[in-house]
Image (cartoon, rainbow, N blue to C red):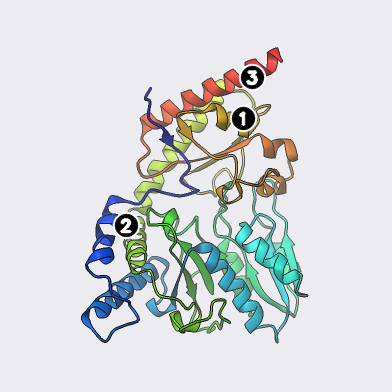
């Protein structure tokens, strides 16, 4: 074993890839111009760098560069997509369809719209975290303007049937938004084949910097119109005003390019590591069960329930492994995971589930060591429970 802390929380965030950092650095101190000030060489160089990043991001999802709007992250992208559509298309209707296991960035936007008189349908999921396509069809109303379903769940890793959902949305002339923060760079996403009209992307989930993201907005067939959420100088086609974070944008472009090029072999490697860890734990700890779909899931995600072991207590006991008890974005919330609860197994399962997510630097030795640490911690907690 090793004394280092083994990082297995890549669904929460990823370290910046050294190759990404090296490309970013000159844009802090050398090429530091404002991309909107192109009257001189400094600004022109910054604009060129931003344009290249747009091209890299667009290529990764089969979009056009001018369909990419830079934001501070997927949360802001979700807000712009949902509020932007709600306001711009209010004349057509005030009904939105989403899912109970969405990220809070989507759910809280929808709750806010409900308080303003919008109707929101929250689709349930099955025991694997998948929406029922038949239920989606039934939920559609003449006044439905938007369907928002995340590409891959941030807690349990379940991948949504995006192509089927996109086809339904297209057929009914309803806009389709997907929060793809966990998906882009990890699984194939094609906005054309999937008929996605709006897509939220985050830089720090793909070994890019934090505080940068993007929103894909379809420009034709149909052309998507958005009311701005942030007002100011009219940057990003008037949708998202504010001086562009050039170093972060450059980093996100490089990160998504690297992730896309290495996606297939990396997915195979990570899936093998996840399977190994699941097997090692199940061989020793009785009753462990998987949360999420057994096959249609992110290759680097493992969410398991360990009966009788409180996840928070387990994490406190672990000194050499970094894992999560639930979504990292809701760590101040003591309530059980809304995602695990939605699977229909009850509150106890939600309190005894952990999320493990491997990454680019994770080795087989890390998996073996981390499994042993987990087994020791679980055994220790079980003994304490027996004597208490």
Crowd tier of the residue under label 3, counting other residues whose Cα lies within 10 Å: few below 14, some 14–19, many 20 or above:
few
Q: Is residue 184 placed above or below 279 in the rendered structure?
A: below
| Residue 350 in the image: above or below residue 101 | above
Q: Name the residue carrying label 1.
A: 313
Where is residue 307 shown, x and y percent of the image?
A: 67, 28
Instruction: Identify which residue is drawn at 67% across, 61% down.
Output: 107
First-in-chain label (2 vs 1): 2
The image shows residue 287 at horizontal and vertical percentages of 64, 27
Please identify the quadrant where the C terminus is shown: top right
Quadrant position of the N terminus in the picture: top left
307 or 61: nearer the eye? 307
How far across and how far down the image is residue 3, in percent? 38, 25
User: Does the rendering let one see residue 242?
Assistant: yes
Name the residue beneath numbered marker 2: 258
Q: Mark 3 — residue?
A: 382
| Residue at x 36% of width, y 69% of height | 59
Residue 195 appears anywhere in the view: no
At a point 55% along the width and 49% down the height, the residue shown is: 296
Distance from disc 1 to disc 3, alpha carbons, whole Å, reads 11 Å
């Amino acid at each position: 074993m090793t004394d280092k802390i083994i990082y297995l929380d890549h669904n929460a965030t990823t370290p910046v890839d050294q190759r990404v950092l090296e490309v970013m650095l000159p844009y802090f101190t050398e090429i530091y111009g404002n991309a909107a000030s192109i009257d001189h060489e400094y600004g022109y160089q910054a604009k060129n760098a931003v344009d290249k990043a747009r091209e890299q991001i667009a290529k990764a999802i089969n979009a056009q560069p001018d369909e990419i709007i830079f934001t501070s992250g997927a949360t802001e992208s979700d807000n712009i997509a949902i509020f932007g559509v709600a306001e711009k298309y209010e004349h057509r209707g005030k009904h939105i369809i989403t899912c109970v296991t969405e990220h809070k960035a989507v759910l809280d936007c929808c709750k806010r719209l409900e308080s303003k008189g919008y109707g929101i349908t929250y689709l349930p999921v099955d025991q694997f975290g998948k929406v029922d396509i038949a239920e989606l069809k039934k939920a559609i109303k003449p006044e439905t303007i938007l369907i928002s379903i995340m590409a891959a769940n941030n807690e349990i890793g379940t991948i949504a049937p995006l192509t089927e959902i996109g086809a339904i949305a297209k057929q009914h002339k309803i806009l389709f938004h997907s929060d793809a923060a966990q998906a882009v760079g990890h699984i194939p996403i094609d906005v054309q084949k999937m008929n996605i009209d709006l897509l939220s992307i985050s830089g720090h989930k793909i070994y890019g910097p934090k505080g940068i993201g993007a929103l894909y907005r379809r420009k034709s067939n149909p052309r998507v119109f958005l009311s701005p959420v942030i007002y100011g100088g009219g940057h990003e086609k008037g949708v998202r005003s504010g001086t562009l974070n050039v170093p972060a944008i450059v980093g996100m472009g490089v990160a998504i390019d690297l992730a896309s090029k290495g996606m297939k072999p990396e997915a195979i490697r990570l899936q093998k590591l996840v399977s190994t860890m699941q097997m090692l734990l199940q061989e020793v700890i009785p009753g462990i069960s998987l949360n999420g779909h057994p096959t249609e899931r992110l290759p680097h995600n493992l969410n398991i329930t360990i009966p009788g072991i409180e996840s928070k207590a387990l994490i406190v006991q672990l000194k050499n492994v970094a894992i999560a008890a639930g979504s990292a974005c809701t760590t101040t919330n003591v309530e059980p995971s809304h995602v695990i609860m939605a699977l229909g197994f009850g509150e106890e399962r939600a309190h005894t589930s952990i999320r493990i997510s491997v990454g680019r630097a994770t080795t087989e030795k890390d998996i073996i060591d981390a499994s042993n640490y987990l087994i020791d911690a679980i055994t220790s907690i079980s003994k304490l429970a027996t004597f208490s």
